[in-house]
Image (cartoon, rainbow, N blue to C red):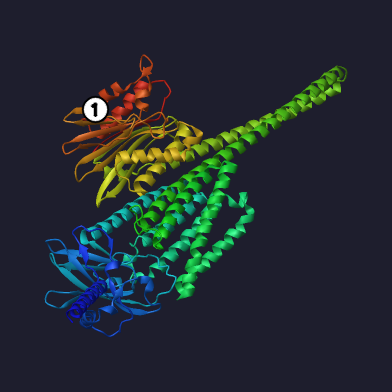
Amino acid sequence: MRFSALRFASFLLWLGFLFVLAFLEMQAQPILFEAHLSRTPIEAQIRVWQNAEEKIEVAQVRQMYLEKPELFVPYQWEKLPLGASQNWLHFTIQNRDKKPQKCVIQTTKFDFLTFYVLQKDGTWKSIETGTSYPQSQKENVFGAYSIALLELDAEAQTEVFVKATYLERTELDLSPIQMNFHIQSESYYQTQKDTRNLAMSFYTGALLVMLLYNFFLYLITRDVHYRLYLLIAPSIYAFIFFSSGLGVDLIENAANTALYLMITSFFHINFHVLFSFYILRIKTFFPKVVKVIMVVLAVYNVLLFIAPLSNGLVGVLARALATPLVFGLFGYTLYLAFRVWKKEDYAPAYYFFWANFFYMVFMVIAVLQLLGVLPFQFLGLESWQNNLIGSVIELTLFSLSISAKITHMQKELAKQQIEQARILKEEETKRLALIEKQNRELEQKVAERTAELVERNEEIQQQNEELQITSEKLEHQHHLLEEVYKDIQASISYAQRIQEAHLPKTDLLQRCFSDYFIFFQPRDVVSGDFYWAAEIWVQGMKRQVFVVADCTGHGVPGAFMSLICANLLNQIIIERNYHDPAQILTKLDQTLRLFLNKDITQNHDGMDCALIVLDKNKKELHFSGAKRPLFYFQKQELHILRGDSKSIGGHEREKGFFHTHTLSFEEPTRFYLFSDGYADQIGGEQNRKFMIKNFRDLLTQIHLDDFKTQKQKVESTFWKWQGKESQVDDILVVGFEV
């Protein structure tokens, strides 16, 4: 009897032990939280009550959890019911830190989520979120993620229930972002959010720079490739903007993320295919595949619009078919680029191939991350970061491919010109040979007729008549030449009026300077020297800009250069709001080189100039010079600000940068700007140049006189020095005070 009692007691102990194990299995282990915790999955610690009653309070759910824990099974998203369902999730968080902490729960799995956090006083604190919950009503917004910020007591467990509702779930889930439940510290969450915002800020800035650069090139070249680049770059940016979540922050319903990604993908893929047609010359190299690509693109576009507009399995299948189609399009254009690159040795195809290759690599990684095949953070990067890196590489290489295409077109044009020159040379050789043959025949005929003329006086009379006709023709040609000369002189006079119309008006100069004089003496009717002035607004304050410039050459060629440079100054200073002298000269140098195609023509036309910007409010003058100085007198002492030893648009061997010099004119100051024509004038008793030293001495002698007297002395000195010698160059001297 005693032995039976012992066996029965042992049986009860084993039964109790098994019961405890089963109970522990049904109870989820707490989530261990520490400060600075990085993103950590917590699905294993979550229990779920599936298809719970819709109208049930959290207190009743907790009572049910305590009384019937078997209803709460381990959480697995894949095993949740299809269609619409309401579920209750449960987990506890153990704060192992000695201080109260805040943690962030993050997911994208449910349309509506209500977090209930049990407080010390037995009440519940609720937090509303979810992918379909209005963004404007969420406490925390971070893209398409559902965010719950929970407060944890020091070294204590916090119990959390979550009412989780989804409106529809299909067997094939291709949501744009796949992320189950994760926990992280508030600091880590904020770091991730700041990292995204900073990365997108840099990306936005870099894209704007590339867009402005290519827009400027498009304005110059009007090439279709730059226009396509200006279309494809914003479409890629829009896709990255929404895939990073930054665009989702601005919309009301995060569940519509897929719709926005579909729309941006539509423009991105279509512009990409169109760009590939032009840059790879597919119609030229592969005319038979054009229709195939267009059919595949049309099918992709149809699927892309069906996906967000259709509910249930139809929309899911549309998304499932659209993804391999777009990869097929990218892969096929990659194959075509490789063939053109290797077969035709076509440089634009080389850059396009690598642009497509790297973009596809990063895009495949991003898609595999979204589908859950790869970790959410693969090699430390999220899917949107992989898309961003791939797009930066692609846009950079696309820009290089356009440059290579332009270079290729220029080489082709040069080959055509060389071939045309060869043909013309051959034709000229044939023509000269024919003329030579005709001359020999003519000489033979003349010899024969000369013998006949000795015997025939009638032919002499005929020749006299022919000479008379020839004389009349020559007289007529002389008259025509006189008319042409008059037309040329009239044209030059008209050009003079055009150039004078471009010079600043007196009222503008009077607003710039309190007093001034200008000695402007072109060598010919029109001049390569000119002066230019404008008033601009900088940060709400008016400033005055004045330029004295000496363009290459004089006469008509110099006048052409002066008009070009004056128009470029209008564009840079007035239209583009440049106001720093060094930046203006640098931009003017770059723009003039592009305008004159110096990389191709190798001409050395350019301009020396002195440029000042007056800030009358601060009583400051900002100066920068291209081989021209600024003379100024303060306290009757001459000071010189020398310009940089670099011309605008000059020789390529001229290196260095332009610099801005700033000086104050709070005390009385007189300034002088001038071209090199005055100092280079030949004259005097020894028939030599006037020289800059004599010019400095002249200004030193006259700078205290009023400006009207100064101009008279500058002019009279010049005429006296020149004497009977011809003028060497255009003359421009400007003196002023502010």
Q: Position of residue 319 (x, y in %)?
A: 47, 67
The residue lying at 12 percent from left, 62 percent from top is 99
Within 10 angstroms of label 1, few (less than 14), some, or many (20 or more) residues? some
- Inspect this view and state whether residue 221 appears: no
The residue lying at 23 percent from left, 79 percent from top is 65
**Residue on which disc 1 sits:** 702
Amino acid under disc 1: Ile
Q: In this image, 154 relative to 177: left or right?
A: left
Q: In this image, 266 relative to 543: left or right?
A: right
Q: Nearer the viewer, residue 490 or 99?
A: 99
Mark 1 secondary-structure assignment: helix
Residue 729, placed above or below residue 559: above
Q: Which quadrant would the C terminus be assigned to in this image?
A: top left
Q: Nearer the viewer, residue 159 or 618?
A: 159
Q: Position of residue 329 (x, y in %)?
A: 53, 57
Quadrant assignment, res 295: bottom right
Q: Position of residue 588 (x, y in %)?
A: 38, 40
Residue 16, placed above or below residue 233: below
Q: Position of residue 520 (x, y in %)?
A: 36, 33
The residue lying at 41 percent from left, 52 percent from top is 390
Number of numbered discs present? 1
